Amino acid sequence: TADDNIQEASRSFNESVALNASSSVAWNALGTALNELEDYDGALQAFEQAVTLDDSISESWYNIGNVQRNLNHNEDALTSYGKAFAIDPQPRVYNSKGMALMQLGRNEDAIEAFDAGLQLESGLATLWYNKAGALTNLGRYDQGLEAVEKALELDSAYEAATALKEQITRLQSGDAASAGDETVTPDESVVGTGNDESAENTSSDFSFSSPDDEGGDQE
């Protein structure tokens, strides 16, 4: 099963860390496996060890920010994302920063983060969807509709975007009861580097390299 595979991966990464205790890549990979097991405290410790060994790798700071969001430590996550894009600004980092800001109720700031990501790569549907959600939370339905329609232009099978478009349409018509009164939550899908052609829809937004990698390109 998937859980068994994750457990086996965690054991393998633990063995790799034991053999490569001074490898930031090994600690980063261990943190990713522990996060998949929802051991967020253990994952955070592993990622922090990775940056203790090498604080110049953007993906390690990005991963720290993501696990901090899982722990609902959104202010700390913002600091980590800041360190990540100071090293290597990528759309996925701005997307994650925007998600943390939305979770803090700071929708205006979240829009700025999503726009910064879109300036780097305008063809990522997840960024357009999340921007639409923040706009909708602020009651800016016309702009939200434009953004979510852009997401659907990029990915016509984007179910969350279709649902959000329907919600915004109901809100525009004044049918708040049908639309529901909950705020829009951000999409957790991965947003890759500026070289990716589209957002990758997976269950994890963590990035890691194999412990066997020898300093290859980081995502």
Image (cartoon, rainbow, N blue to C red):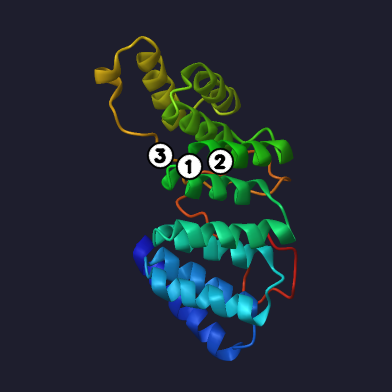
Looking at numbered disc 1 in the image, what kind of residue is underneath it? Answer: Arg
**Mark 3 = which residue?**
185
Please tell me how crowded label 2 is: few (under 14), some (14-19), or many (20+) other residues with Cα within 10 Å. Answer: some
- x then y, percent, for residue 163: 39, 25
Label 2 residue SS: helix
User: Relative to the observer, which residue lies in front, 109 or 46?
Assistant: 109
Based on the displayed image, in which of its 4 quarters is residue 185 positioned?
A: top left
Q: Does 28 sit above or below residue 140?
A: below
At 49% from the left and 46% from the top, the residue drawn is 101
Instruction: Tell me the residue at 51%/16% (across/down).
Output: 142
Residue under circle 1? 106
In the foreground, 130 or 111: 111
Write down the residue under mark 2: 109
C-alpha gap between disc 3 and disc 1:
12 Å
Secondary element at tag 3: loop
Q: Please state if 210 lies on the left or on the right of 183 as rendered.
A: right
Q: Quadrant of the C terminus?
A: bottom right
Residues 70 and 189: in front is 70
Which label was assigned to residue 49? none
Residue 112, percent across and down? 61, 38
Q: Is residue 99 visible?
A: yes
The image quadrant of residue 19 is bottom right
Q: Residue at x 65, y 60 (%)?
A: 84
Kind of residue at disc 2: Asp
What is the C-alpha distance between the residues marked 3 and 2? 15 Å
Local crowd at mark 3 within 10 Å, few (<14), some, or many (≥20)?
A: few
